[in-house]
Image (spheres, rainbow, N blue to C red):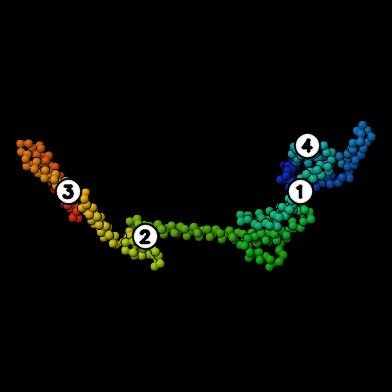
Amino acid sequence: MGNYPRKSIGVLSRTTKDQWFRRMQNHLISEDLWEVVQNASSVTLSTPTSEIGSIPVINIEPKDVKANAKVTLHIQFCLDDMDEEDVAGMATAYEIWRFLVHKYKEKLQTTGRQYLADYMGYKKPADQSIQEAWTHLKKLGRKISDTQPDMKGLCRNDRLVQTLLASLPTEYMTTRDTLDAQGYLDVDIVLQRLQEKEASLKADETTMWAKREANRSRSRHQRRSASAESGSGRRQYKRKSSNDSRRCHICQSSRHFADDCPKRDKVREFLRRDRLKERAEKDRGPTSIRNTARTTRKITALQESLSLTTAAAPTPRKALARNLQLCQRRMSVRFLMTTGLPTLARPHT
């Protein structure tokens, strides 16, 4: 082996431990080195009576020295700095392998129970495909078998298929009943049938979405056409049913609204005359009477002043005539508003 397998196997960690041990085992088997980490018969302990004292010394058979060094080197190349420091004082690959298995592979019972609960209560999410659900169940089964070896039966394909069928939503009920009625089928056939059903459901969903978009587009087109036909920009109201409470507030008709009522102009004219009448009644009040009396006295005084003014003084005479004309016009306007008659045109002076 010229190249060390760090790139193909990876570095051992908590997240890659299952994959790392599986790849390293296959690699050592392919190189006829798996017995080095599995068989401890070539490793013996002795206590020599030398200056070392009573410290046990690990003796390795000469024929296994090369294989032990080779396996140790390959394992160390696939470890991080911390794990490499931990195994630096170990002399045999067997000891290194047992240490790594004890550190990474032995899990707590609570972890195994959690894996088992996730496996038994698994329900396929809506955004997960059949293939992804199958891969997820296989990983859960492998983790359960690693933590609880007596439950390795959960990793069998027939148990995984039954768990997958039980986790499917109601849309797969017909396909599931058909598969149950056909009895035992190969795993690949079952997955193929489920994937075909999944593709059919996606096609139906796409068709429904296209129909909804077409209906929305048609509704928008109809609303634009109705708005264009209205002409004046008013909304075209449809005739409502007899039990509809919305009516015209002018004539109480259910066929139209107030904006389209034929009696609208007559009602407006009536309201205008009514307002003029109210204003005339208001002008007949005490304040209007006092203003009228004051204007009358002013007109009388201006007429007397104008009669006393001689033609030799044209400027004062014109000013008095202009004031008299304004007072008379004010009296005529007040009279017309009081009687409700239309206002006369302004006379030319």
Which mark is in front, 4 or 1?
1
Marks 1 and 3, Cα distance to the nearest angstrom? 111 Å
Asked if the residue at tag 3 contacts the one at tag 4, i.e. Cβ–Cβ closer than 8 Å, the answer is no
Query: Callout 3, which amino acid?
Result: Thr
Mark 2 Cα within 10 Å, few/some/many (few <14, many 20+)? some
Percent x, y for residue 4? 76, 40
Label 4 or label 3, whichever comes before in sequence order: 4
Q: Name the residue under label 1.
A: 107
Q: Mark 2 points at which residue?
A: 236
Q: Mark 3 points at which residue?
A: 292
Q: Is mark 1 on a helix, strand or loop?
A: loop
Seen at 91% across and 36% down, the residue is 54
Marks 4 and 3, Cα distance to the nearest angstrom? 118 Å
Asked if the residue at tag 1 contacts the one at tag 4, i.e. Cβ–Cβ closer than 8 Å, the answer is no
Which mark is in front, 2 or 3?
3
Seen at 80% across and 47% down, the residue is 29
Q: Mark 4 points at which residue?
A: 85
Label 2 or label 3, whichever comes before in sequence order: 2
Percent x, y for residue 197? 62, 61
Label 4 or label 1, whichever comes before in sequence order: 4
Label 1 or label 3, whichever comes before in sequence order: 1
Q: What element carries label 2?
A: loop
Asked whether 44 or 307 is in front, the reply is 307
Percent x, y for residue 114? 71, 52
Marks 2 and 3, Cα distance to the nearest angstrom? 53 Å
Query: Callout 2, which amino acid?
Result: Gln
Q: Is residue 114 visible?
A: yes
Position of 45 relative to 229 (above/below): above
Quarter of the N terminus within the rendering? top right
Position of 283 relative to 75 (above/below): below
Which mark is in front, 1 or 2?
1
Label 2 or label 4, whichever comes before in sequence order: 4
